[in-house]
Image (cartoon, rainbow, N blue to C red):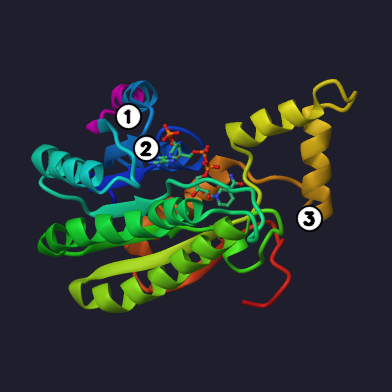
């Protein structure tokens, strides 16, 4: 299938590792130019340079904390100067949490609200006008299965990802008259380096390998019995970015090996 993505421009938050990196590589393979951001400057710049040289696309790597309104504004300015705007926005930066509602302070709630919701609001607000002028575009918000099916150790993550899912629906209705398709993706267990690091730490000295630990999690939770790879998930992102997904609007798609236990 020809995805008709060549020479489009994509902004990807958290594009330096894990899912964001896999999506960046998937889009670059289709000839999409990239503006990647993440906090760790060295890593995001190195990744952008590597993708640019491998795929013959332009790739900007910018050090940005997406919870910081000024850094987001400066990044949008860089995107405008380098590319004149963007056709695709992927709100992917995010991370899990660990707390109980009775213990978590307000500033923790605020941080995750800024990370998972306000970053997407601010980037969309800043990028949509140029996207419209360029003939339309695509926004994908990477939430989580936890937006619908919460994990008990991370209420702040569950709540803010749920808000991102609703934000996607609201954005889709507001932006579709401008030719901008917004969708939300809720991944399940995706084997990123962070999972491996955590599993390695948790199994150290226990006699169990990190692979066995992860296998058990996957078998206990998912009908498919395994983690997904970032690349398997990225293929779906790339398709949704394509004009070939032209009738996909305002939906939330689960890519979770069957983990979701309700019909949604
Ligand atoms: P990783 O931890 O592997 O990558 C997260 C990315 O986001 C990194 O590039 C990181 O770079 C960046 N990032 C984190 N915080 C900020 C910030 N404040 N400002 C800018 N960039 C930031 O995560 P995954 O790839 O696993 O997850 C990506 C998204 O997918 C997240 O939103 C996560 O909630 C979601 N998800 C993941 C699942 C999984 O199983 N892996 C399942 C369901 C959803 P840096 O640290 O340099 O800032």
> Which SS class for mark 3?
helix
The prevailing secondary structure element of the residues shown in magenta is: helix
Circle number at residue 29: 2
First in residue order: circle 3 vs circle 1: 1
> Which SS class for mark 2?
helix
Left or right: residue 46 compared with residue 6: right
**The magenta segment:** 48-59
49 part of magenta stretch: yes
Q: Does label 3 point to a residue whose CB lies under 8 Å from ligand 1?
A: no
Nearest the viewer among 22 and 217 is 217
Q: Quadrant of the C terminus?
A: bottom right
Task: Give the number of marks.
Answer: 3
Q: Are marks 1 and 2 in contact (CB under 8 Å)?
A: yes
Q: Quadrant of the N terminus?
A: bottom left
Left or right: residue 199 compared with residue 255: right
Q: Residue at x 63, y 61 (%)?
A: 101
Spatial CA distance of label 2 from label 3 is 33 Å
- Residue 8 lies, in percent from the top left, at 23, 48
- Report the residue marked by disc 1: 55
- Report the residue marked by disc 3: 221
- Residue 77 lies, in percent from the top left, at 13, 43
Spatial CA distance of label 1 from label 2 is 6 Å
> Residue 137 appears in which quarter of the rendering?
bottom left
């Amino acid at each position: 299938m020809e995805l008709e993505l060549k020479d489009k421009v994509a902004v990807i938050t958290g594009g330096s590792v894990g899912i964001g990196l896999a999506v960046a590589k998937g889009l670059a393979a289709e000839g999409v130019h990239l503006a990647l951001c993440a906090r760790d400057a060295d890593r995001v710049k190195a990744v952008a340079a590597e993708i640019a040289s491998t795929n013959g696309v332009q790739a900007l790597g910018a050090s940005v904390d997406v919870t910081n309104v000024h850094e987001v504004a400066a990044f949008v300015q860089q995107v405008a100067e380098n590319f004149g705007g963007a056709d695709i926005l992927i709100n992917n930066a995010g991370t899990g949490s660990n707390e109980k509602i009775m213990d978590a302070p307000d500033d923790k709630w605020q941080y995750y609200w800024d990370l998972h919701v306000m970053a997407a609001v601010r980037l969309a607000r800043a990028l949509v006008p140029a996207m419209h002028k360029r003939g339309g575009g695509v926004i994908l918000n990477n939430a989580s299965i936890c937006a619908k099916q919460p994990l008990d150790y991370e209420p702040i993550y569950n709540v803010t990802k749920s808000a991102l899912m609703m934000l996607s629906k609201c954005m889709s209705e507001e932006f579709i008259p401008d030719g901008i398709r917004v969708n939300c993706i809720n991944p399940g267990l995706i084997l990123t380096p962070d999972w491996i690091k955590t599993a390695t730490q948790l199994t150290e000295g226990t006699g169990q390998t990190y692979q066995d630990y992860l296998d058990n999690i996957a078998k206990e939770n998912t009908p498919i019995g395994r983690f997904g790879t970032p690349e398997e998930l990225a293929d779906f992102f790339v398709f949704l970015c394509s004009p070939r997904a032209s009738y996909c609007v305002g939906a939330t798609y689960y890519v979770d090996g069957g983990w979701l236990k309700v019909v949604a």
